[in-house]
């Protein structure tokens, strides 16, 4: 297998993952657009200065070079998730993020209006709840 072809493919994949065109990515790497195109076509191999520049901008250089997502501190399952996520198109990524967001507990409970009742005890809420509190005047 020609390793430079894989590097070029992964380089283009990382660029697209960040939503950049070749000109913007070339600027980050400090190269010309022509050089960027040659890297992605695997007709040239990126040098250390380019790789350091894109790493500094948050690109996963170990993934570009080896095909393995950076796994520092990640479990095998998390590495598999990251790798799978990166293969998705925009719609697939949005779906995964929506799924994860829907599975997380809300950070806070918002109560509006005057509240004068105290509720003791505990319960687990798994769906939205509405409370209707009628205000009665005291005489």
Image: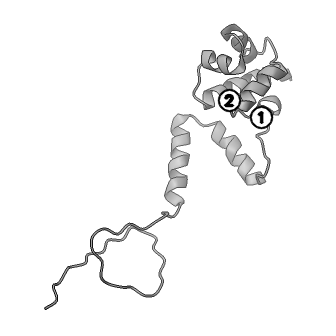
Foreground pick, 105 / 50 = 50
Residue in view at x 75 percent, y 16 percent: 39
Q: Which residue is mark 1?
A: 63
Q: Give the alpha-carbon distance from disc 1 to disc 2, as whole Å.
A: 9 Å
**Quadrant of the image for the N terminus?**
top right
Q: Which residue is mark 2?
A: 14
Determine the image quadrant of residue 65.
top right
**Quadrant of the image for the C terminus?**
bottom left
Q: Tell me the SS state at disc 2.
A: helix
Q: Position of residue 21 (x, y in %)?
A: 59, 19
Residue in view at x 66 percent, y 10 percent: 33
Foreground pick, 113 / 39 = 113
- Most extreme residue toward the front is 139
Q: Position of residue 81 (x, y in %)?
A: 68, 47
Residue in view at x 84 percent, y 22 percent: 48
Q: Position of residue 14 (x, y in %)?
A: 68, 29
Q: Is label 1 in contact with label 2 (beta carbons under 8 Å)?
A: yes
Instruction: Give the crowd class for mark 1: few <14, some 14-19, many >=20 residues within 10 Å.
Output: some
């Amino acid at each position: 297998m020609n390793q430079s072809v894989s590097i070029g493919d992964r380089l283009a994949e990382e660029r697209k993952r960040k939503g950049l065109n070749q000109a913007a990515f070339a600027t980050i790497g400090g190269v010309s657009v022509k050089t960027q195109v040659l890297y992605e076509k695997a007709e040239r191999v990126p040098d250390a200065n380019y790789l350091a520049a894109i790493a500094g901008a948050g690109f996963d250089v170990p993934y570009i070079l080896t095909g393995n997502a950076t796994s520092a501190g990640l479990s095998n399952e998390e590495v598999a998730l990251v790798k799978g996520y990166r293969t998705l198109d925009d719609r697939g990524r949005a779906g995964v993020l929506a799924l994860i967001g829907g599975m997380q507990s809300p950070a806070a409970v918002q109560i509006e209006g005057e509240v004068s009742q105290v509720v003791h005890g505990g319960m687990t809420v798994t769906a939205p709840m509405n409370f209707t509190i009628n205000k009665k005047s005291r005489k």
